[in-house]
Image (tube, rainbow, N blue to C red):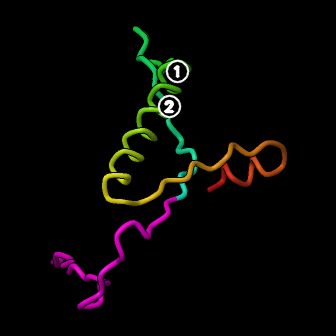
């Protein structure tokens, strides 16, 4: 049995001549799932809440800085509480 390699082609969805007006983008940042920790001597992952919070803050700050330089606005979504929290976590 012979196998054939799959070929992929890049396709762009940009319309020729389209230019997004400077500073017109608003980006909603929903808290990403981030887990930071250390590997124990037994090989198990041991999460570290302080490192995780710091990593989450650093990612949000870096994204905000990069997008602000482009003139875009980053809006951080509020942390849901109650029934909406599970629905948000599913996404």
Q: Is residue 42 above or below residue 4?
A: above
**Which element type, helix, strand or loop, lies under badge 2?**
loop
Left or right: 10 with respect to 33? left
Look at the magenta stretch and give its main secondary structure: loop
Q: At 47% across and 19% down in the image, what residue appears?
A: 44
Q: Nearer the viewer, residue 3 or 56?
A: 56
Q: Is residue 49 above or below residue 60?
A: above
Viewport quadrant of the C terminus: bottom right
For the record, the magenta segment spans 1-27
Q: At 40% across and 8% down in the image, what residue appears?
A: 41
Q: Residue furthest top?
A: 41
Q: CA–CA distance between discs 2 and 1?
A: 7 Å
Residue 11 in the magenta stretch? The answer is yes
Q: Residue furthest bottom?
A: 16
Q: Residues within 10 Å of mark 2 (few under 14, many from 20)?
A: some
Q: Nearer the viewer, residue 16 or 21?
A: 21
Left or right: 8 with respect to 91? left
Q: Is residue 2 above or below residue 80?
A: below
**Which element type, helix, strand or loop, lies under badge 1?**
strand
Viewport quadrant of the N terminus: bottom left
Residue 16 in the magenta stretch? The answer is yes
Residue 73 percent across, percent down from the top left: 47, 57
Q: Earlier in the sequence, mark 2 or mark 1?
A: 2
Residue carrying label 1: 47
Q: At 54% across and 57% down in the image, what residue appears?
A: 28
Mark seen at residue 35: 2
* Contact? badges 2 and 1 (CB < 8 Å): yes
Q: Nearer the viewer, residue 19 or 28?
A: 19
Q: Residues within 10 Å of mark 1 (few under 14, many from 20)?
A: few
């Amino acid at each position: 049995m012979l196998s054939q390699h799959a070929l992929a082609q890049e396709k762009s969805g940009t319309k020729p001549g389209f230019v997004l007006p400077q500073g017109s983008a608003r980006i909603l940042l929903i808290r990403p799932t981030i887990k930071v920790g250390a590997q124990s001597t037994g090989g198990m992952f041991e999460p570290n809440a302080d490192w995780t919070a710091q990593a989450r803050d650093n990612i949000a700050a870096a994204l905000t800085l990069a997008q602000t330089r482009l003139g875009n606005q980053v809006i951080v979504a509020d942390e849901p509480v109650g029934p909406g929290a599970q629905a948000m976590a599913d996404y």
